[in-house]
Image (cartoon, helix red, strand yellow):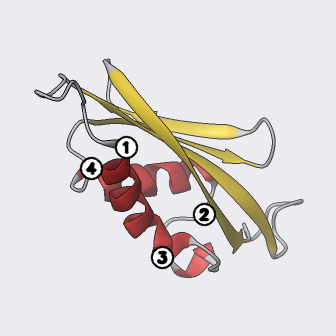
Amino acid sequence: MFIGREFHIDSAHQLPGHPRCGTLHGHTYRIAVELGGAQDERGMILDFADLRRETEAFLEHLDHVYLNDVLEKPPTVENIADYIFQGLKERLPGLTRVKVWEGHGKYAEVGEPR
């Protein structure tokens, strides 16, 4: 069984040398976090309030910042998704997937094999 929740952050970045994304610009990123596992005695994998609290605590340092100053790798949507996935693994046991949309219809997804 799986549960998930969506979050949003606003951040700026640039990809030096890229013909379109080489200049400073920003996005509203939509982020989906998915957990899998067995239900506990309450019938839950994890309470949605706990999922929100832990995820927002991690995402706080990515909101309204220049991502080039935060990520060690270029802040592509692929690297942002991987950064979030790696950062949430310790906070959220059972984390299976992180999906990050950059604008409308464009996303990267990182996760454990099912």
Separation of disc 4 and disc 2 at Cα? 20 Å
Mark 4 or mark 2, which is nearer to you?
A: 4
Closest to the observer: 91 or 14?
A: 91
Snapshot quadrant of residue 57? bottom left
Type of amino acid at the residue the image marks with label 2:
Pro
**Is 50 left, or right, of 72 in this rendering?**
left
Mark 3 or mark 1, which is nearer to you?
A: 1
Mark 3 or mark 2, which is nearer to you?
A: 3
Quadrant showing the N terminus: top left
Asked if the residue under mark 1 is in contact with the one under mark 2, i.e. CB atoms within 8 Å, the reply is no
Q: What residue is pinned by disc 1?
A: 48
Q: Which mark is residue 89?
A: 4
Mark 2 or mark 1, which is nearer to you?
A: 1
Residue reaching furthest right? 20
Question: Which badge, 3 or 1, is on the more N-terminal residue?
Answer: 1
Residue at position x 14%, y 28% in the image: 40
Q: Position of residue 33 (x, y in %)?
A: 45, 42
Residue at position x 22%, y 25% in the image: 37
Q: What residue is pinned by disc 3?
A: 61
Type of amino acid at the residue the image marks with label 3:
His
Q: Secondary structure at mark 4?
A: helix
Mark 1 or mark 4, which is nearer to you?
A: 1
Residue at position x 10%, y 27% in the image: 41
Q: Secondary structure at mark 1?
A: helix
Separation of disc 3 and disc 4 at Cα? 16 Å
Q: Which mark is residue 75?
A: 2
Residue reaching furthest front? 42
Type of amino acid at the residue the image marks with label 4:
Lys
Question: Which badge, 4 or 2, is on the more N-terminal residue?
Answer: 2
